[in-house]
Amino acid sequence: MDERNKDRFDEASEGTCERVRKILQALPRSIKQEAQEIRLRVGRPVSVCCPEGVRFVRKDGRVSDVPDSGCLVSDRDDLESSFRILCSYSVYSHENEIRNGFVTLRGGHRAGICGTAVYQNGAVSGLKDVSSINIRVAREIPGSADSLLERLKKNIDAGLLLAGPPSSGKTTLLRDIARQLSNGVSGTVRKVAVVDERGEIAGVCRGVPQNDVGLCCDVLDGYPKADGIMLAVRCLSPQIIICDEIGSEREAYAVEQSLNAGVGVIASIHAGSVGELLRKKQALSILATGAFASVAMLESSPLPGHIAGIYRTGDLIAETGRGGSAHFCGNPGGIHGIA
């Protein structure tokens, strides 16, 4: 793991209150380099999620595999103070993000916020009584997409959908793909547009990407994906559009329009297996646009971005038509895997 990831952990921990932050930043370097999430829950021990499992933070700046009396327990004041820090002491200015359950921090770190929903006119308008916070540590792993790009070669321009469970490294791969394509690492420089609705891919702060997404990359920060894709097609003349976590009908329509304009799309979607992917109506709708020639299935692994299998989209759709989506469950390589 890159040494930079230790600093990434410290950067993410800036979103916690002073009492918790001091102890988090005193943790061993080995834990900081591996940590994927920082978890605060009211009345529960502060924990750090690593590839090998959950580690509980102790008051003395160490970690343990099991909670005990020496663990650091976050209280109501810790949660409320951390929430205000995450919102830069302006909850009003982050209302839209909070309504969706998260706040994005400088550097692309994302804080998921759990509490009591506040409804107005039949829709969630905010939350109160924050009960837990999950800060996902954004990682830059240069070269993490090497294997994937090598296996796909020029097929990458025909569109790629990354599918995988949470914390499997989808965003990490998207970030490195953007960097490599817009830098011409594969031999040809592409004009890339990143539609970064949640600010996780580029981590833009005051107009400047905090993550390396390459030299020929334009970032549409904070745009809803459907709007950002359409704007990129109309105004930025990209060769490749990259976005995270697609799924809605509007997004599928925007992806289809980009295909009609001759623009390749690389995106991600949540799915724990190929079988699960093919049981999702929104996934089938997206695949049916024809914008994705290939699907790369990721799996949970100590190293983010581990590819379990690469499939031709046409083969997956054909298998679904035969009622055979269950065939892929537990068989990530699949008979349709691309070598």
Image (cartoon, helix red, strand yellow):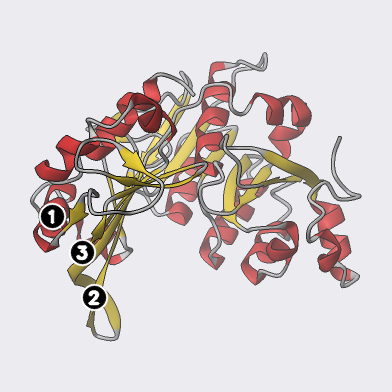
Question: Which residue is at the front of the view, 271 or 232?
Answer: 271
Q: Image point 82% across, 59% down: which residue? A: 328
Q: Quadrant of residue 146?
A: top right
Residue holding disc 2:
116
2 left or right, relative to 293: left
Judged from the image, the secondary structure of the residue bearing numbered disc 2 is strand
- Mark 2 → mark 1, Cα distance in angstroms: 17 Å
- Mark 2 → mark 3, Cα distance in angstroms: 16 Å
- Mark in the foreground, 3 or 1: 3
Question: Of callouts 2 and 1, which one flags the residue occurring earlier in the amino acid sequence?
Answer: 1
Question: Which residue is at the front of the view, 194 or 104?
Answer: 104
The answer to whether 287 is drawn above or below residue 307 in the figure is: below
Crowding near pointer 1: few (<14 within 10 Å), some, many (20+)?
some
Residue type of the residue flagged with mark 3: Gly
Crowding near pointer 2: few (<14 within 10 Å), some, many (20+)?
few
- Mark in the foreground, 2 or 3: 3
Residue holding disc 3:
43
Question: Of callouts 2 and 3, which one flags the residue occurring earlier in the amino acid sequence?
Answer: 3
Question: Of callouts 3 and 1, which one flags the residue occurring earlier in the amino acid sequence?
Answer: 3
